[in-house]
Amino acid sequence: MKVTVVGAGNVGATCANVLAHRDFLQEVVLLDIKEGTAEGKALDSWQQAPIDYYSTRISGVTNDYERTAGSDVVVITSGLPRKPGMSRDDLINTNANIVKSVTENISQYSPDAIIIVVSNPLDVMTYCAYLTAGKDSSKVFGMAGILDTARYRAFLAEEIGCSPKDIQAILMGGHGDTMVPLPRYTTVSGIPVTELVAPDKLEAIIQRTKVGGGEIVNLLGTSAWYAPGAAAAQMVEAILKDEKRIFPCCAWLSGQYGLKDIYLGVPVILGKNGIEKIIELQLNQNETELLKSSADHVKEVMDVLDNMKVVA
Ligand SMILES: NC(=O)c1ccc[n+]([C@@H]2O[C@H](COP(=O)([O-])OP(=O)(O)OC[C@H]3O[C@@H](n4cnc5c(N)ncnc54)[C@H](O)[C@@H]3O)[C@@H](O)[C@H]2O)c1
Ligand SMILES: O=C(O)C[C@H](O)C(=O)O
């Protein structure tokens, strides 16, 4: 099995490195437009193999899409990250053109590949890749929900004083400050989270999760990469091992949750066919309203992309 990661920056290189460590792929190709970057990071990762005991062959190329031919999954991380003071939506002008041209190239050499988009603004860049690739939406989707849910789970584990492994949670909506963490669907080894965390503490954790990306941008001057890279790798693994894992992913909705023609974070089953099912939860009125307002925001940014006419 072969995976290409486009963009050998912070997120892409981390994703490729995590994939190599999982040791279930024959080949990972890292591609970047910047001369030498992908080659250098791939070589460094390959030299880690004898230390960490993996056999996955990881190599890097500068914009040579022929070397990505026949990939089963392609992860798109190419594009600018935001800086302090910016919103993810501010990246649309630059990143739409990058995501479009990358999708055209990977579609030429790996027409059957499943595409996972990571570049921001996530929901709209996934839409951009979908329009460009012209393939079924079950094969083009985005990574954000695993990351956002991981942040929520990490904060909860810290508050409760338990292992993050024991927090199960789901979070929906767009990958922005309107995302919708769902305490009603959050448990700690089967115990409802509301039995372990006081309402004011839970609300503070929800608010911190919504701006979790920005918290890291303010600390680093650029955005996160360890958790995002690992989250994208987890999606690749679920697909190529046909694990049927349930994750929140950015998926194309065609009537689910009363929403259509929009990419939005929802729980899905991931397997060898990509998104094999979108799970429809019975949301209450408040949750439905929050999801609708998140969808309204994503739709506005999708309209910006449509008006830019980047994708004919
Ligand atoms: N979905 C999420 O949850 C999530 C999480 C973290 C970051 N992101 C986004 O992922 C993207 C990458 O973040 P990063 O921190 O890795 O940035 P980075 O600047 O470290 O890396 C981006 C890489 O993309 C490359 N690139 C630019 N144009 C290219 C092209 N046309 N073809 C190939 N490569 C190209 C650059 O040379 C650079 O190496 C950003 O848009 C960021 O906002 C999304
Ligand atoms: O916050 C960002 O801009 C990057 C990413 O979307 C994140 O949530 O870490």
Image (cartoon, helix red, strand yellow):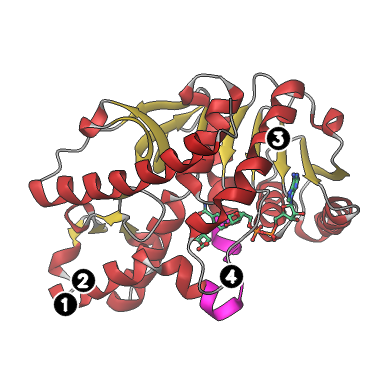
Answer left or right for 210 relative to 272.
left
Q: In 3D space, how far apart are the residues under numbered discs 2 and 3 (Cα atoms)?
A: 41 Å
Q: Is mark 3 within 8 Å of ligand 1?
A: yes
Answer left or right for 189 relative to 306.
left
Q: Which label's residue is closer to the chain start, 3 or 1?
A: 3
Q: Residue at x 47, y 66 (%)?
A: 213
Q: In 3D space, how far apart are the residues under numbered discs 3 and 1 (Cα atoms)?
A: 46 Å
Circle 3: element type: helix
Residue 101: numbered disc: 3
Position of 220 relative to 140 (above/below): below
Instruction: Tell me which amino acid carries mark 1.
Output: Asp
Q: Are marks 1 and 2 in contact (CB under 8 Å)?
A: yes
Q: In 3D space, how far apart are the residues under numbered discs 4 and 3 (Cα atoms)?
A: 24 Å
Q: Is mark 2 within 8 Å of ligand 2?
A: no
- Give residue 4's quadrant in the image: top right
Q: How packed is label 1: few (under 14 Cα within 10 Å), some, or many (20 or more)?
A: few
Residue sitting at the far left: 285
Nearest the viewer among 302 and 112 is: 302
Answer left or right for 25 relative to 289.
right
Q: In 3D space, how far apart are the residues under numbered discs 1 and 2 (Cα atoms)?
A: 5 Å
Q: Would you say residue 47 sits in the magenta stretch?
A: no
Q: Which residue is mark 4?
A: 83
Instruction: Tell me which amino acid carries mark 4.
Output: Lys
Q: Which label's residue is closer to the chain start, 1 or 4?
A: 4
Q: Which residue is mark 1?
A: 200
